[in-house]
Structures are given as C-alpha cells and as structure tokens.
Image (spheres, rainbow, N blue to C red):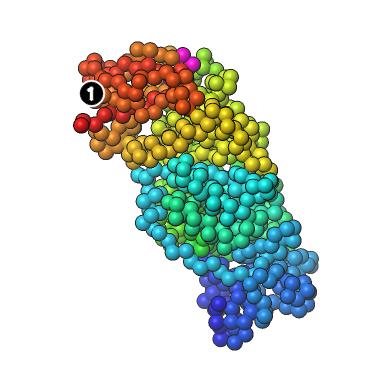
C-alpha cells in the first residue's frame, strides 16, 4: 500500500516521463492502485486519454454512475486521475469516457491488472504484484546459445479439460508441469494468456495486455504456476502480441474518441488479415505502453522470456497490402521504422532490466539481423523461428518417397543459411489449424508410413542445428487438427503405435539434453558437417554433430524411403566402435525393429573423405544416431 501526503497520485516527474514515453514502469502509476492518500485508504485511478472532454471512473462502488467521480485532467501529459476513498482490492471498475467526438463510452483500463470472469469485462482493483526476484544465473544458463532448449508450446485451455471444463492454473501446476518435466522439455511456451474476450482468438486478440485471463483463475494462481514451473527446473515463455489489437468498443480502439493507440489512417492502422487495429508505434505513450508491458510480465510474474508474435507484419508497411493501399516511410520505402525502433527498445530494455530473460521472434521474411544486436543494426532478439526449415521439411515428408530423390535439396537447403541467425526450429500450432490438419496427417503414406515419417521428422529436428519447439499433441502423433474447444486426443496413448511416438519424443529430449554435440555449437559452423548430402538416388542424408572434444560426436543417418538398406557404407570421423544411441525404427517406438544390434565397428576403409567407415543396415523410413564408444 502506497502512503501519499499529496493531493495527486502522479508527480511532475511521472507526468514528464509518461509524456516522453520514457517511464520505465508505467504500470506502477497508470491503472488502479490501492494506496493511502492524506491519511485516507482508497484507490488512485489514472488513465491516459488526452483528447477526452471528460473521464469518470465508475464501478460497483458508485453504482456505475459517472457523475459521482469525475477525474482531474493533469495538463500536457494527457493523463486523468482521481483518488477514491474506501475503494480497495476486488472493486469492479471501468472508465466512462466522453470523447472528443461527443460520444460517451465505457472503456476498460488499458493498465488493468485483473478482470472479472464472465461477459462484463469489468476491471478489478488489485495490488500490484510483488516483484519476482529473478534467478538470472539459472535463466542465463538455461537460455544461453550453448544450452539445450526444447520448448513445449501450450494452449492452456485445450491441453486437458478436467470434467469437460477449462483447467485453472492450480490444475495446470499439478498436471502440466510434471508432464513437461517427465517428457524432458526445458521450456513451456504459453500461447497468449492476456485477457481476451474472444476465446476463439487463442489469445492473439488481447484487450487486457496487463491482465492474465480470468478464465484460468486469479493472477495469484498464475504467479504460483510460474513458481511451480521454476521449482521443477522449467523456464516459461509467454507469447506476446504487440502487432495488433481488437476493435472491441470497450477496449483500446478510439479510446478517447480519437485514434489514440492506433493510426487514424486505415492504410496504417487496420490489419487486413485479422480485422484488427495496429498500434501507432511512433507515439511516445503507445511505445511506453508496449515496452513497459514486455518488462511487466518478466518482473512481476517471473516470465523468462517473450515469443513475439507476427513480427513480419510489424516490420513492413506493405505487409499483406496491395499497391496503393499502404503508406510509405519517410524515405519512400516499405520498412516500418517506428516498429523497428520499438522492437529494438523492447529488446534493449529487457536485456538491461531483466538479465537472462530472452525474446524470440516469429519472423517469416529475410529481414536481416533479427538476432543481431541493435548497436550493429539488428533488432536485438535472442532467437528467431526458422520457418523456412519448417516449410521445406514438412513439404518433403508429404511427398511420396518415390519422388523424394527429385526434391533432395529441400532437406539440405536449411544448412545454407543456418548460421545467419540464432534459430528455433518450430513445429507450432500454426501448422495444425485452419484446415491444415495435424502433423501426423501431413505425412505421406498409410498409417504405418505416417508414423514412421513423423518419427523421422522429430529425429531430424532434434539432430539439426537450432533450438526445438513442438506444439502439444504432436508428441504422440495426434491425428486430428487441433481444436481449441476440446482437449487433446489423450486416448491415442492407449494405442501402442502412438505411445511409441510419445516414447520417442521423450527419449529425443533426454538425448538432446545429455549430448553436448547436439546443442552446444548450434550457431557455429564447426558444430555440423555433412558426411554425404548428395545421395539423392537413395534419399539418404548423413551428417555429424560435433561438441568440443573428439568424444562429443553424434553421427546422424536418415533413410527417407520405406526400403531397408543393407550393407550401406558410411564414412565416420574416427575409428572404433560406434554405438547406436537412437533408432527410430525400434520396436518400442512402433517400428519394424531393423537396425544394427546396438553397435557397429569401423574398418580402415576410406569413405566420404574419412579414413574409417562403418557398414550399416539403414531401417526403412528411419533415422539412426551413432556415437563413438569411449575407451574403457
């Protein structure tokens, strides 16, 4: 509780910083804050609405009557404030805004920390959450470029539905966290949990950027969920949406009767793809709103990083727009300088104020330097989704194997640019919605071949340079397209073939984490070398992942056809025994059991540029991982 001995909640320094867009933590002053002012206990309300004729706070404490608590305008900052005695935690409120256009509209607080359940969309007064003391060493170790990062992407409302109902954070702490730990993932990525009235938006149309959605429980239980994940050794990433916001009448759109948070010109301010509004990134207060929000989730809830949605749509003024329906930048070009400046500022602020926290860009173009530092002309993200790898790999595995020889470069091409950015390899929710079917359904062939191809996909992903991301349900080969209104197909785990895929993903995670060669040099050309990238005739790919010592090597061989290949000679980096640490065709994974009895010995026969080679049985539609056996 803040004790104040003045008549105003906002000091002159606050007003100046807010107007400049340089208030590092605007959420400490804007919004609703229980406090003691001149000896009276109540709540201070403050809202930015510079063009409004009048702003009143209404709520259950004044029968929603705008005449009772008219707010005071605080000069050039465009902020209105009022202290209401006797109002405390749990009170419902909104702002009654008489706009410049003469309309009076009830608006939700842009800085609301909590919202009510149900359809009223009222804000709820609550104390600002205490700062979560960061664990920068743990974060830095877990999220460093040299550390394993295996992300489980979750839509919390459809992971499981106990008794047919939406889960709450307590249920998820009890069930989701231990499940993710058992499966060997290092991170949970939550699809947006900011308040969003339209459940079917999956959180990508948030109206309460500072409030966890009430449909999953209280803010306190959300904090407890994050703490439970941390106690279990997991990091938590939050999907964050600064690219657009919905046009709901009670939300940010035309907040004070003018285009305030958005651009007035629809060529800049309206998102054609999603029928949403676009933030005016060049406006100081809007930039401050967004930069502050990024830091808020990390500082006040303990989030370990942000996955930033739809970055490509922010970077280009002509994104998804035909000629003549977009506004060029000041130099006549298509780049959105204001959005670029915002993203750099977000990443700089998070980097300075929250050591160890990360940002990940969903960026689908060839924009240069997404993960380069801002001082070197980059955007400053730590990681970028490699959507090219995803599209090429899925397209290849959808092909009939008889045609794969003619598309051999779909698999090899990703290594041509693998070191241009720091990448995450995503198999995300985007690939299993809007009629795209499931990952399982994308694979070519009958049911056996679909499962085998899916096992190839996962083993290839975990062996390829780049961090890993898998959307929930993919870990056992869900057969149906994801449905946000139902829980996942957990019943498939009763099928031994799907249980085998589940076991494979668990083993892949643990092998990936325990083998330095598979993660420590993801961004170094010296961490990867093709053995043979040219065997298109057999649709076989082979390569080595290197760690820092001769013992830290993993040889990977992928047979992309349903034909077992016996007597396949392969060059290896060193002589001796090579142990088969993974075979996706193993019986326990639902395969046929073809393989090499657990190990092979090399012979001094030169092959593929190496002095030693091994002779392998390559299982049909299978992947082998081999490591050198250490001397006793």
Asked if the magenta segment contains residue 562, the reply would be yes
Q: Position of residue 411 (x, y in %)?
A: 45, 26
Q: Secondary structure at mark 1?
A: loop
Determine the main secondary structure of the stretch shown in magenta. Answer: loop
> Which quadrant, please, contains the C terminus?
top left
Q: Please tell me whether residue 88 is drawn above or below residue 471 in the rendered image.
A: below
Residue 133 appearing in the image: yes
| Count of labels in the image | 1
Q: Is residue 437 left or right of residue 420?
A: right
Closer-to-camera residue (64/350):
64
Q: Position of residue 161 (x, y in %)?
A: 64, 46
Q: Please tell me whether residue 255 is drawn above or below residue 473 in the rendered image.
A: below
Which quadrant of the view contains residue 609? top left
The residue drawn where x is 66% and y is 62% is 115
The residue drawn where x is 54% and y is 33% is 476
Residue placed under numbered mark 1 in the picture: 575
Q: Is residue 428 left or right of residue 381?
A: right
Q: Position of residue 260 (x, y in %)?
A: 66, 62
Magenta range:
559-563
């Amino acid at each position: 509780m803040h004790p104040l001995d003045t008549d105003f909640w906002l000091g002159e320094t606050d007003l100046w910083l807010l107007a400049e867009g340089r208030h590092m933590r605007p959420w400490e002053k804007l919004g609703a804050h229980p406090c003691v002012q001149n000896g009276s206990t109540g709540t201070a309300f403050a809202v930015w609405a510079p063009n409004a004729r009048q702003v009143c706070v209404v709520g259950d404490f004044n029968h929603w009557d705008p005449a009772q608590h008219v707010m005071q305008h605080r000069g050039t900052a465009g902020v209105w404030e009022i202290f209401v005695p006797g109002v405390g935690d749990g009170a419902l409120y909104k702002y009654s805004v008489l706009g410049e256009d003469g309309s009076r509209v009830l608006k939700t607080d842009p800085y609301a920390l909590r919202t009510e359940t149900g359809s009223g969309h009222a804000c709820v007064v609550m104390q600002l959450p205490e700062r979560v003391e960061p664990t920068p060493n743990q974060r830095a170790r877990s999220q460093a470029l040299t550390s394993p990062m295996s992300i489980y992407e979750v839509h919390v409302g459809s992971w499981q539905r106990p008794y047919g109902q939406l889960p709450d954070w307590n249920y998820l702490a009890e069930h989701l966290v231990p499940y993710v730990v058992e499966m060997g993932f290092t991170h949970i990525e939550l699809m947006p949990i900011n308040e969003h009235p339209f459940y079917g938006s999956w959180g990508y149309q948030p109206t309460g950027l500072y409030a966890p959605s009430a449909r999953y429980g209280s803010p306190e239980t959300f904090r407890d969920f994050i703490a439970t994940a941390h106690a279990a050794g997991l990091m938590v990433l939050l999907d964050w949406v600064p690219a657009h916001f919905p046009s709901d009448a009670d939300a940010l759109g035309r907040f004070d009767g003018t285009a305030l948070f958005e651009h007035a010109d629809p060529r800049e301010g309206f998102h054609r793809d999603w029928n949403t509004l676009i933030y005016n990134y060049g406006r100081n207060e809007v930039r401050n709103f967004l930069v502050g929000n990024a830091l808020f989730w990390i500082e006040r809830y303990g989030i370990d990083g942000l996955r930033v949605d739809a970055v490509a749509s922010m970077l280009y003024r002509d994104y998804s727009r035909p000629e003549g329906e977009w506004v060029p930048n000041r130099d006549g070009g298509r780049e959105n300088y204001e959005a670029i400046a915002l993203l750099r500022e977000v990443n700089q602020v998070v980097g300075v104020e929250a050591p160890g926290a990360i940002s990940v860009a969903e960026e689908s173009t060839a924009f240069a330097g997404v993960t380069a530092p801002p001082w070197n002309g980059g955007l400053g993200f730590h990681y970028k989704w490699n959507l090219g790898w995803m599209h090429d790999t899925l397209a290849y595995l959808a092909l009939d194997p008889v045609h794969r020889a003619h598309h051999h470069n779909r698999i090899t091409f990703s290594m041509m640019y693998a070191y241009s950015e720091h990448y995450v390899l995503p198999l995300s929710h985007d690939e299993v919605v809007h009629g795209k079917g499931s990952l399982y359904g994308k694979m070519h062939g009958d049911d056996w071949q679909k499962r085998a191809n899916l096992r190839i996909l996962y083993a290839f992903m975990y062996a390829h340079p780049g961090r890993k991301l898998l959307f929930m349900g993919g870990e056992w080969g869900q057969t149906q397209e994801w449905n946000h209104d139902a829980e996942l197909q957990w019943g498939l785990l009763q099928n031994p073939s799907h249980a085998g895929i589940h076991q494979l993903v668990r083993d892949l995670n643990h092998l990936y984490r325990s083998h330095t060669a598979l993660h420590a040099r993801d961004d170094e050309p010296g961490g990867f070398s093709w053995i043979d990238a040219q065997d298109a005739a057999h649709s076989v790919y082979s390569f080595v992942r290197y760690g820092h010592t001769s013992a830290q090597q993993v040889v990977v061989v992928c047979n992309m056809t349903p034909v077992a290949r016996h007597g396949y000679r392969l060059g290896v980096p060193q002589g001796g025994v090579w142990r088969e640490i993974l075979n996706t065709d193993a019986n326990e994974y639902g395969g046929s059991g073809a393989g090499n009895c657990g190990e092979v010995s090399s012979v001094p026969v030169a092959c593929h540029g190496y002095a030693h080679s091994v002779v392998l049985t390559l299982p049909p539609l299978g992947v082998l991982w081999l490591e050198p056996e250490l001397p006793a």
